[in-house]
Image (cartoon, helix red, strand yellow):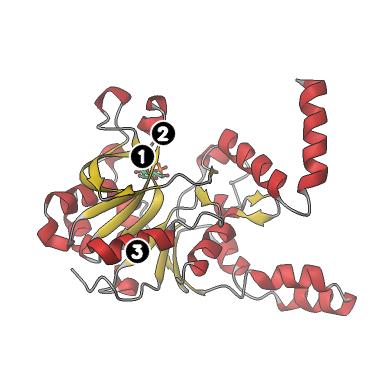
Amino acid sequence: MTESRAQITKAVIPAAGLGTRFLPATKATPKEMLPVVDKPAIQYVVEEAVTAGLSDVLMITGRNKRPLEDHFDRNYELEQVLRDKGDATRLSRVEESSGLGTMHYVRQGDPRGLGHAILCAAPHVGDQPFVVLLGDDLIDPRDPLLTRMMRVREEHGGSVVALMEVPPESIHLYGCVAAAPAGETDVVRISDLVEKPPAEDAPSNLAIIGRYLLDPAVFEVLRKTEPGRGGEIQITDALQTLAGEPSLGGPVHGVVFRGRRYDTGDRGDYLRAIVRLACEREDLGPDFRDWLRGFVTEEM
Ligand code: G1P
């Protein structure tokens, strides 16, 4: 186990998935680039990481993911056109995404599961704790989850995952944990993890949402983790090993998140996320809410 108080600076964002749930939109465009209102989903995630102090961002990509690199890079031509027009507002929107953290990219090659994607980060991360953010989960910036997870690691060491209570009929979509209270009301100590169990086998209604603060000991465990659910190497299984043997890399705790989370993982959730975020936007919200009220009363 590494020193738990060391500043955590590295974020890993797996983005190699094919996005088949959004075909044909994702035939030639990475699903991470689909806009949520007017920003690609992935930009919310990078902003969340950078706001929490994770200024070094590694994306695990694959084929057809070049637009991700371009999005977080400068676009001099476009910047110049907007500068010549004196359009400062749009210029700052263009510059926003290239002025975030230091971006790095590595390709996964074989898509062998989330655990395997995380393992691709090992050479870059080295022997430091790091944070994994999954792009399908957007966390509202008003409910800072990562800083809470960092505090929990400072106190307990080891690894920390984000959890959320979900209805029993949804638990089969998530990694699920067995856990016991660990002092504060939002912290639990995890004893067991299972990837996407059927409702009747689920040890609780606590689902893993896509934020993990991992001790680097996880890499050694992942190297030895056999393919699990769906024939893929699962991070949930590696965490199960860590939880069962704290001597490897410290305990595994969970932070039970009760804030605002927007799921962009499938089409229905994606639409709901856009409507909710659009309603809350200061610039677009007032008009959009008025229209939505009318639409719901007249059309539904
Ligand atoms: C992944 C993880 C799962 C976790 C989920 C959170 O599943 O394997 O344990 O609960 O992310 O979004 P996926 O949704 O990528 O299938």
For disc 3, the neighbor class at 10 Å (few under 14, some 14 to 19, many from 20) is: some
The reply to whether the residue tagged 1 has its Cβ within 8 angstroms of ligand 1 is yes
Query: Along the horizontal axis of the image, is 75 left or right of 162?
Result: right
Q: Is residue 290 above or below residue 98?
A: above
Disc 1 residue type (three-letter): Ala
User: Residue 287: where, in percent of width, then height?
Assistant: 83, 44
Q: Residue at x 82, y 74 (%)?
A: 88
Q: Earlier in the sequence, mark 2 or mark 3?
A: 3
* Quadrant of the image containing the C terminus: top right
Q: Label for residue 207?
A: 1
Q: Earlier in the sequence, mark 2 or mark 1?
A: 2
For disc 1, the neighbor class at 10 Å (few under 14, some 14 to 19, many from 20) is: many
- Disc 2 versus disc 3: nearer the observer: 3
User: Residue 174: where, in percent of width, then height?
Assistant: 37, 38
Q: Can residue 266 be spotted in the picture?
A: yes
Q: Are marks 2 and 1 in contact (CB under 8 Å)?
A: yes
Q: Label for residue 166?
A: 2
For numbered disc 2, what is the local secondary structure?
Answer: loop
Disc 2 residue type (three-letter): Val
Give the quadrant of residue 3.
bottom left
Q: Work out how far the residue at label 3 is from the one at label 1, CA to CA, in angstroms.
A: 21 Å
Q: Earlier in the sequence, mark 3 or mark 1?
A: 3
Q: Residue at x 89, y 75 (%)?
A: 85
In the image, 227 versus 84, the foreground residue is 84
